[in-house]
């Protein structure tokens, strides 16, 4: 297995980066969809279960299930393969731990977004458009930490 990882390191890394890009796109866009969902319904005085509400729910479900979930899983699989490749990660350095904690934080955020989607479906969303806008900044902060850690390797 170690020989496989070493021989195919460049491909594994390429697939990891592609998976991360897809996952991040979803993490940036889903909270924005929630902003539009909350504000679009409020602005038009439209109720839960309306055509507009169901359209937002459909878009949110597809983004989460068809793009974000597979991309997150692929990111983790290829990332763990990279971690298992000899000589790639030095766990004695701070950067590896910063990245690990930030990736776990990104995963927890992903799960919170999935839970929020269920709240929208049940008509139990309690956050405002402004609050969702603020939540939309978290993946950016985590991305800055991850990229800085990996590139600078402090």
Image (cartoon, rainbow, N blue to C red):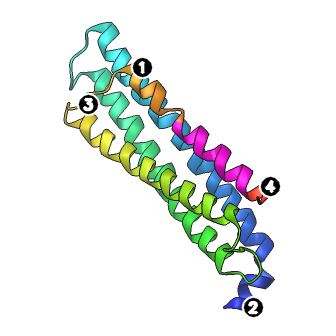
User: Closer to the N terminus: mark 3 or mark 4?
Assistant: 3
User: 102 above or below 134?
Assistant: below
Residue 57 locus on image (x, y percent): 33, 34
Residue 112 locus on image (x, y percent): 37, 46
Q: Is residue 64 left or right of residue 139?
A: left
* Residue annotated with mark 4: 152
Which residue sits at x=63%, y=54%?
Answer: 20
* Residue annotated with mark 2: 3
User: Closer to the N terminus: mark 3 or mark 1?
Assistant: 3
Residue closer to the observer: 14 or 50: 14
Measured Cα–Cα span from mark 3 to mark 1: 13 Å
Q: Is residue 47 left or right of residue 33?
A: left
User: 116 above or below 107?
Assistant: above
Name the front one of labels 3 and 4: 4
Q: Secondary structure at mark 1?
A: helix
Q: Is residue 151 left or right of residue 75?
A: right
**Magenta stretch in the rendered image:** 138-149
Q: Secondary structure at mark 3?
A: loop
Q: Main secondary structure of the magenta part?
A: helix
User: Closer to the N terminus: mark 2 or mark 3?
Assistant: 2
Name the front one of labels 3 and 1: 1
Residue 68 locus on image (x, y percent): 49, 50
Q: Is residue 131 left or right of residue 147?
A: left
Which residue sits at x=20%, y=30%?
Answer: 123
């Amino acid at each position: 297995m170690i020989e496989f990882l070493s021989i195919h390191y460049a491909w594994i890394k390429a697939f990891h980066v592609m998976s991360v890009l897809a996952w991040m796109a979803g993490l940036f866009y889903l909270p924005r969809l929630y902003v539009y969902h909350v504000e679009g319904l409020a602005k038009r005085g439209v109720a839960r279960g309306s055509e507009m509400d169901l359209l937002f729910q459909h878009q949110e479900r597809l983004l989460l299930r068809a793009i974000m979930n597979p991309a997150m899983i692929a990111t983790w699989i290829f990332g763990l393969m990279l971690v298992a490749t000899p000589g790639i990660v030095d766990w004695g350095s701070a950067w590896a731990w910063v990245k690990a904690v930030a990736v776990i934080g990104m995963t927890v955020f992903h799960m919170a977004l999935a839970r929020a989607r269920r709240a929208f479906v049940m008509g139990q969303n309690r956050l405002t458009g402004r609050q969702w806008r603020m939540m939309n900044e978290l993946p950016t902060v985590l991305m800055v930490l991850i990229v800085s850690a990996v590139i600078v390797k402090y």
